Amino acid sequence: MKWINSIIDKGQLADGGLHITNEGRVLRPNNVVEEKPYSVNNESINGYIVVSAENIDDAVKLSEGCPLLNGKGTSVEVREALKLG
């Protein structure tokens, strides 16, 4: 909750109702960043949050503090969201 609260305090937690694009980046522990999101179906999404950032690089930097990255075999995927309507 500390990490989420820090995003809220910065005014960067965005409303839902968005659709993600196919482009993105995957963060892994120890600041490893892969340039492509998962493209196979053997990985699952356990949850997501929508944040407000200037660009994908800023979103990656914001995501570096996510406590999920402290776990073994974990990752955080960052994608651009498109608001419909």
Image (cartoon, helix red, strand yellow):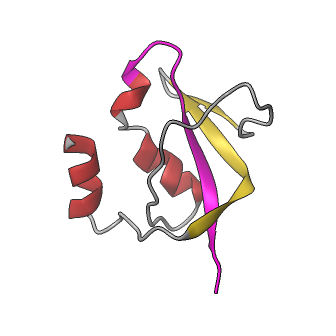
Q: Residue at x 34, y 31 (%)?
A: 67
Query: Image check: 74 left or right of 11?
Result: right
**Residue 84 among magenta residues:** yes
The C terminus, quarter of image: bottom right
The N terminus, quarter of image: top left
x, y (%) of residue 13? 35, 63
Q: Which residue is drawn at 57% across and 63% down?
A: 55
x, y (%) of residue 9? 20, 62
x, y (%) of residue 57? 57, 53
Q: Residue at x 44, y 53 (%)?
A: 49
Query: Image check: 47 left or right of 35?
Result: left
Query: Image check: 41 left or right of 50?
Result: right
x, y (%) of residue 3? 26, 43
Q: In which quarter of the image is residue 38?
A: top right
The outermost residue toward the right is 40
Front residue of 72/57: it is: 72
Q: Which residue is drawn at 41% across and 17% down?
A: 71
Q: Which range of residues does the magenta coloring cover?
A: 70-85
